[in-house]
Amino acid sequence: KPSWLRHARRADARQAAAPTATCGASAAPLAAMRFSTVAQGVLLGLGSARAQQAGTVVEEAHPTTSLKHCTLTEGCAAEPAAVVLDANWRWVHDKSGYQNCYTDGEWDPSFCPD
């Protein structure tokens, strides 16, 4: 038998022997709790994505460059690429003006109240 098949069968046997719930609880409430946590995460993510808006003052442009992709058989070939700044370096400001939301390591509470 191939070694990968032996390892897969051992993993299946260990999984079958493992308890699906603790303290006598059934697996159904645990699955529902996991789904609820995932659903909450998705809903929270949608809210924060909606708060972000594309800028209109300066169109975002990614500087172009080229990278080399090398293989032993074909050598190196140039590939086009673009550079994107990390989100931490993007300007975050009030959408109705130019006042920074984040200055000297602190969020402005008038824009981002807790």
Image: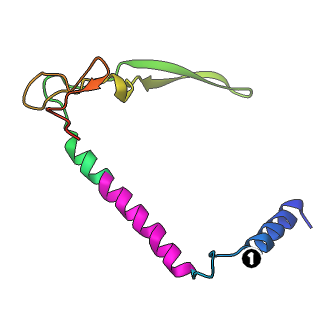
Relative to 6, does residue 41 appear above or below in the rendering? above
Residue neighbourhood size for the residue with mark 1, other residues' Cα within 10 Å, grouped as few (<14), some (14–19), many (≥20): few
User: How many numbered marks appear?
Assistant: 1
Residue 109 point in image, percent of width and height: 18, 32
Q: Between 44 and 3, which is closer to the camera in this rendering? A: 44
Q: Is residue 6 left or right of residue 64?
A: right
Horizontal and vertical percent position of residue 15: 73, 71
Residue 13: name its quadrant.
bottom right
Q: What colour scheme governs how the chains and residues are painted in the rendered image of this protein?
A: rainbow
On the image, which quarter does residue 88 sit in?
Answer: top left
Question: At 48% across and 19% down in the image, what residue appears?
Answer: 66
Q: Which residues are magenta?
A: 27-44
* Residue 43 belongs to the span the image colors magenta: yes
Residue designated by label 1:
16
In the image, residue 55 sits, relative to residue 52, either above or below, namely above
Q: Is residue 48 magenta?
A: no
Residue 48 appears left or right of 27: left
What's the residue type where badge 1 is placed? Ala
Image quadrant in which the N terminus is located: bottom right
Left of 64 or right of it: where is 66? right
* Quadrant containing the C terminus in the rendered view: top left
Q: Residue at x 29, y 17 (%)?
A: 104
Q: Residue furthest front?
A: 23
Which residue is at a point 13% across and 23% down the rendered structure image?
57
Q: Is residue 29 above or below residue 77?
A: below
Image coordinates of residue 69 in percent, x first then y, are 60, 25
- Whole-percent x, y for residue 90 in the image: 29, 24
Please tell me whether the stretch drawn in magenta is mainly helix, strand or loop. Answer: helix
Q: Residue at x 22, y 40 (%)?
A: 52
Instruction: Using the image as rendered, state which of residue 85 and residue 25 is in the foreground.
Output: 25
Q: Secondary structure at mark 1?
A: helix
Question: Where 9 sits versus 87, above or below?
Answer: below
